[in-house]
Image: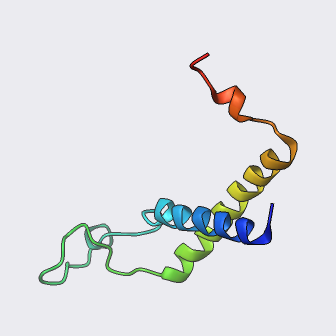
Amino acid sequence: MKPQSILAIYILFWTLSLFVVLPFGARSPHEDGVAAAPGHAPSAPHSFSFGKAAVRATIVSAIVFVLFYANYRFGWVTIDMLDWTR
């Protein structure tokens, strides 16, 4: 696999992982006893740390990418195994 392909696939995994981990760790104002700012949804988090979300996404995407690449190298699951129309 070319390095460009590895980088592109990792970026895809990272982006997907970011959306997966975004809800974790976010606390809405009513959970902390803080009043929501006027014009904001009561369920919207009152503080957000992109850095924490990025670190979580990096960890998750690294684990998933290692599994993906190991499967690519060793062929644990092939396309023929996933063809259920036979």
Residue at x 53%, y 67% (from the top left corner): 15
In the displayed structure image, the side of residue 50 where residue 64 appears, left or right: right
Q: Which corner quadrant of the image does residue 27 belong to?
A: bottom left
Name the residue at 85% across, 48% down.
Answer: 73
Q: Position of residue 76 (x, y in %)?
A: 80, 36
Q: Is residue 81 above or below residue 21?
A: above
Quadrant location of the N terminus? bottom right
Residue 33 locus on image (x, y percent): 27, 73
Q: How many marks?
A: 0
- Colouring style: rainbow
Q: Is residue 44 left or right of residue 50?
A: left
Q: Is residue 21 left or right of residue 57?
A: left
Q: Residue furthest top?
A: 86
- Residue farthest to the left? 39
- Which of the pair 58/10 is nearer the observer? 10
Residue farthest to the right? Answer: 74
Q: Is residue 59 above or below residue 78?
A: below
Relative to 14, does residue 63 appear above or below in the rendering? Answer: above
In the picture provided, is 40 more to the left or to the right than 1?
A: left
From the image, which quarter does the C terminus lie in?
top right
| Camera-side residue of 80 and 39 | 80
**Residue at image location 73% in from the left, 51% down from the top:** 68
Where is residue 18? Give x, y as percent. Answer: 52, 67
Residue 82's image quarter? top right
Residue shown at 47% from the left, 67% from the top: 25
Query: What x and y, as percent, mark residue 38?
Result: 12, 83
